[in-house]
Structure formats: C-alpha cells, structure tokens
C-alpha cells in the first residue's frame, strides 16, 4: 500500500461509499486480467484497485487507514507469536508512544480486536493469558466479508465457473444456474481470520448481472427483440434463434408486423425444481440502409397495391 489508496481509485478523502463503489467497478473492469491477459502493468493496477477497495469499502478499516496511513498495513499484518511471548510484526511504541507500558498495554487488546485483520489463528501468550496473570480474551469468530462480483447474463442463466481477485488472491466460484441480480453465495471460512483461535468468517458474494446486447431477463422468462427482414415478416419464415439450450427454430407467421410477440416455451431461465420459464420474442422489422432504384419502385408498388391506415386510431 505504498500509494495512497484514495489516489489509486482517483478519489478524494471525503469520497462517499457510493463513489468508492463506482470507482472500483470502473477500474476493476478496465484492468481486469481477462481483458488484459498479457499486460503485467494492468495486472498490478488491478491488484492495487482491489486492495484499495477492500480497505476503503469497510468502515472500520477505512477509519484505521485514515488515522494511521501507511502504518495501517503493519497493523493488519500483525499478530501473536506464541513462541516469542509477545507481538509479531507490530511496534507497540510506534502506535502508543513510549512510557507507561502497562497502562498502554491494558487497552491494546480492544484496539487489536478492532483493527487486526490478518493475525495468526490460535495466537496468544504462553500459558493462555496476558502478563500479570490476566486471562486471554475469549476466541471470536472472524468478520464476514461482503463482496460484489459481476457475471454475464449467460452465466447467471446457465450456471458455470467465474473467477475474481480479492486481496491479490484469485478465487474461482461455481455459479448455480438461475441466479438473479442480488443473489448471494456464501463461501465458508473465506472471510476475516478469527480472533484468539476463533474460526474465520465467511465470504459472501453478491451477484451483479451484466446487461446483454440482445437478451433481457424478466423473472423466470427471457425476452429477445428479434430483427427480421421485411420479406420474412410479410411472407413468413423459419428462423433459428439462440437459446440457453441451443438453437431453436422459430416459425414467423406471414403478415407479421413489428411488435408481434412469439413464445418459445421452456427456453427461459431454469428453476431449481427442474422447470423453466419461456423465451418471449418480439419481432422488429428492419430495412436495409440503402436500396437501389428497382427496390424502391417495388416498395412503391407494394404500398399502392396494399392501401391501409396503420394510424387511424392514433390520438393524444
């Protein structure tokens, strides 16, 4: 954390939690290793962005960082060394000042419990207590970590494996089929380490689903606006449509207009009980950007031979 964490995210120290979240999402997408597979600079930037977000998105960590700056990393990296009879990697005098060691030490256990996130499990003083015969604090379970991951719509519907980085660690997680925006996945014992021998907390992943250029989810159904040619709509056609289960042939009735809705049953989002929603297809007639003179003449003849008023009931 040699570089200021606020600068890593391009923010000021008065940034709100929402601003921190937006900045992290923007930079994480920009530097993600999947988008920059052979770029070491991008990979390093991605790690720094993740580190900055991990600290600044947590109220307690952010408060500690704002107070101690670069020393915050030392505090989080500190822990008990049962063999040395003291603290490992943590300079107490640097934090509390010199003199009055017993008085300063008495308040340290509370300070340690609030700020240390990376201490060793099962740590403590020899004999299970503190100097002066005081009893060691009771073990405590580590805090849970809540972390948002973004997945494609295809993965949300069909399920699959996705990977992400958290505190420089690459984590792979299996996404079950049918998850929706806001769904939570719990990874046991992947959160903050426990205090004084307690178990680790959990990592709770909050799912965000990326938008798709063509498909949209509506509860258990999928919706698709399907572009079709004028001739396909006017004369009818059979068109192969991609679905989560592979391509399915859709029959377009002759004389279909833009906005006509067709349903492919069972081609939507798979449910836990084995059932699935539908794929709702809305037709949208598209014309070519350019037409030659003969085509324009044919269009004119068609219009003259098929007079009707599509806007007869249009009102304000």
Image (spheres, helix red, strand yellow):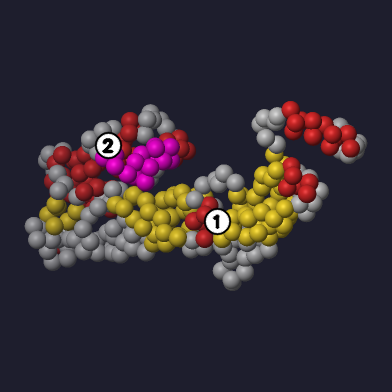
Residue that appears at 29% across and 42% down: 38
Q: Which residue is mark 1?
A: 180
For this rendering, which residue is in front, 188 or 144?
A: 188
- 157 sits to left or right of 256: left
Residue that appears at 59% across and 71% down: 274
For this rendering, which residue is in front, 120 or 33?
A: 33
Residue 178 place in picture, x, y as percent: 55, 61
- 125 sits to left or right of 115: left
Residue 296 place in picture, x, y as percent: 76, 30
For this rendering, which residue is in front, 234 or 89?
A: 234
- From what the image shows, is residue 115 above or below residue 26? below
Neighbor class of circle 1 (other Cα within 10 Å; few <14, some 14-19, many 20+) is: some
- 302 sits to left or right of 128: right
What span is colored magenta in the figure?
A: 24-40
Which residue in the rendered view is the most extreme toward the left? 84
In the picture, the disc for residue 41 is: 2
The mark lying in front, picked from 1 and 2, is: 2
């Amino acid at each position: 954390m040699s570089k200021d964490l606020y600068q890593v995210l391009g923010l000021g120290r008065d940034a709100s939690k929402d601003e921190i979240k937006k900045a992290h999402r923007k930079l994480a997408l920009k530097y993600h290793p999947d988008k920059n597979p052979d770029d070491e600079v991008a990979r390093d930037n991605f790690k720094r962005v993740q580190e900055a977000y991990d600290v600044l998105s947590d109220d307690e960590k952010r408060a500690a960082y704002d107070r101690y700056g670069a020393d915050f990393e030392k505090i989080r990296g500190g822990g008990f060394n049962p063999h040395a009879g003291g603290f490992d990697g943590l300079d107490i005098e640097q934090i509390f000042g010199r003199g009055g060691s017993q008085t300063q030490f008495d308040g340290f256990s509370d300070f340690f419990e609030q700020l240390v996130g990376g201490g060793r499990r099962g740590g403590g003083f020899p004999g299970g207590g503190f100097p002066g015969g005081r009893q060691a604090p009771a073990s405590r379970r580590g805090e849970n970590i809540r972390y948002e991951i973004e997945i494609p719509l295809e993965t949300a519907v069909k399920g699959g494996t996705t990977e992400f980085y958290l505190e420089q660690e690459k984590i792979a997680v299996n996404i079950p089929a049918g998850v929706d925006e806001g769904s939570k996945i719990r990874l046991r014992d992947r959160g903050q380490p426990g205090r004084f021998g307690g178990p680790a907390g959990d990592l709770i992943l909050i799912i965000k689903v990326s938008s798709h250029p063509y498909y949209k989810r509506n509860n258990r159904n999928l919706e698709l606006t399907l572009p079709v040619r004028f001739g396909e709509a006017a004369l009818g056609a059979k068109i192969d449509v991609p679905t989560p289960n592979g391509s399915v042939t859709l029959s377009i009735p002759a004389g279909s207009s833009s906005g006509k809705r067709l349903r492919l049953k069972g081609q939507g989002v798979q449910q836990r009980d084995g059932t699935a929603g539908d794929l709702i297809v809305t037709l949208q007639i598209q014309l070519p950007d350019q037409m030659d003179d003969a085509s324009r003449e044919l269009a004119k003849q068609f219009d003259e031979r098929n007079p009707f008023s599509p806007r007869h009931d249009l009102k304000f």
